[in-house]
Image: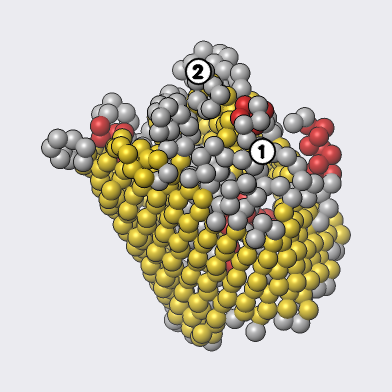
Amino acid sequence: MRFKTFMLCACATVAVGAHNPVDTDSVYHLPEFVTVAPKVRHLNESVNLDLKVNPVKSSQEILRTVPGLFIAQHAGGGKAEQLFLRGFDLDHGTDINISVDGMPVNMVSHAHGQGYADLHFLIPEVIEEVDFDKGPYNMSKGDLANAGYVEFRTADRMPTGAAVEIGMHNYQRYRATASLINNHRQSLYATASFLTDDGFFDADQNFKRFNGMIKYTDWGENSKFSLIASNFNSSWNASGQIPERAVDNGLINWWGSLDPSEGGSTTRTNLQALHHLHVADGKGTLNTTMYASYYTFNLFSNFTFFLHDPENGDEINQHERRWLGGANTEYTHQLKVRGNDWKVSGGAGFRYDQVKDLWLYHTVDRHQIGTYSLGDVGESSMWAYSGAEMNFGKLMINPSVRVDWFKMDYIDKTAEEYTNPNNSQATVSPKLNITYDVTKDFRLILKSGKGFHSNDARVVVIEKDKPTLPSTWSADFGFKWYPAKGLTFAAMGWFMHSNQEMVYVGDEAVVEPGGRSRRIGLDLGLRYEFLKDFYFQCDYTYSHARSIDDPKGENYIPLAPVNTLVAALTWKHKSFVANVKARWLGDRPANEDYSLTADGYCIVDLTAAYTWKKFTFGVAIDNLFDTKWKEAQFETETLIPGDKEPVTDICFTPGTPFSLRGYVSITF
């Protein structure tokens, strides 16, 4: 897609709305230039303002609140989305650390891919705040936090209410919340939602998802304690990724499928305890998080069709059952040094994953006919970190260091005798962040540090020469500027060196460790409240990603995003809010020599909502101009009916067409 096409699309950006009731007593203004700890997370306050102006309208929208983060769904809505950020094809979470109230979302050594992050267990309406940063610069975020991290915090209080949403393709969503206790000392609420959707493909996706959550919070004189229980289960059918030539030669249409038996199911049940304590006469805070989860995953996919088994086809089944638990505690102490505010912090934690029946089966119509792999994984990790924020008036220096240790065990159940090999490794990650306030309206920001991601236990235990914790080195330099009232502009140039690239292998539906890579890029962000009722936001990113170990011209990193831009304009007047948002992802290489292109796209979404007394009425339109686009794209070698020999081309999942939904909610 050409840049001119994007500009026309972005200029069409005029109005998005909210599923939450419009707060007619609130006026949203860009923040004045104040210190937000830590100062280096320079866009956090802007993104949380975006959330207040335009609350997310679906599970997919949750991650799109992070500037420059794009997603792609390619399995009927039930599987975790494919993620893209900072020149990374993150697969489903390999190089981004995602958590909710301190509980990790990412699954290490997962059946489908390292770091698999299914966020669909989180109900969008309970999100109160988003904390994020790009790059490996936060000492409290360890494994997978290379491109960055995203942490969601849920609300302590929710009003009693209900909502119904109906849309095209038999889309239905029902939500209810009961505030059972709500006083100055305690809060208890329960919320649940149910979603069903047939989808827009020829074969109904029969997508069903249930979410439930209960949160209790108790405020003491110097403390706060929260207990959270949540449950999620989902099932779906999928039309999968289809070869371009299957559509071009008329074998199937744009919305068709070559294997309609694809799909799956997944569940997750969580229990979390959060404790916040003020100590040392209010100068110290102790935050402790504990969590336990039970998780199941069962996915049927067919990426290569008849390439490996011309008689039965190549459908595979990836499956696991997992228990995971862990805790983290952090102490922060505030002190005065020559009249300036300093903070010193330290923390430690652990996590353990026990994965049973981690299998890859060969199947036909979801029935097993062969076994590729079968085993159990036990993975332990421990960490500790310490750092300080030292303020010298206009200058703030934030040095820190983090130590992580991993131990991985794998039992191969396909071996003649059960063997239990293991591997362990530790890594040290120093970090240094600096800000300097040139004026009260202009801040310089420098961020630097080392990060890492853990590799799949099945790789590092069996192949001892593969690193367990390959590292990255990264640096950002830029500024944040308030040139006028209501206007914020941020710019960051960045660099990242990775000791190991994770490579997607389409015919096996796995991610394997590859070689070294180098990335450079530019992030630009703008927030502007140019009139009382109008709020404009715009984020542009450029990334240049290359493999170091391959010759020039053959060193492109497949699917790495190059240009992205999101632009949105919101109009909020009294009880009415409307917003239109355009998102543009440019063309990018689909393979190492760029002989195949993953086509770019520009999509415009529109939402609007009106609140009358206790009711909110709204409408949401996805893909306003009914653009024909490819959401997920891969270079894959396949064999399909009509082929005389295997062909390597683009396999894709069509993106959402024009889709209209209406909703009504009531708050008691």
Which of the two labelled residues, at mark 1 and mark 2, occupies the earlier sequence position?
A: 1
Asked if residue 205 is positioned above or below residue 445 in the image, the reply reads below
Rendering quarter of residue 87: top right
Residue 125 vs residue 430: left or right?
right
Label 1 environment density (alpha carbons within 10 Å; few <14, some 14–19, many ≥20): some
The residue at 57%/35% (across/down) is: 242
Where the C terminus falls, by quadrant? bottom right
Q: Give SS at disc 1.
A: loop
Residue 633 vs residue 471: left or right?
right
- Tell me residue 217's x, y (percent): 46, 77
Question: For the residue marked with disc 2, what is the amino acid?
Answer: Glu
Q: Residue under circle 1?
A: 254
- Tell me residue 497's x, y (percent): 49, 29
- Tell me residue 425's x, y (percent): 27, 38
Asked if residue 75 is positioned above or below residue 589 in the image, the reply reads below
Q: Residue under circle 2?
A: 645
For the residue pair 86 and 58, the one nearer the viewer reads as: 58
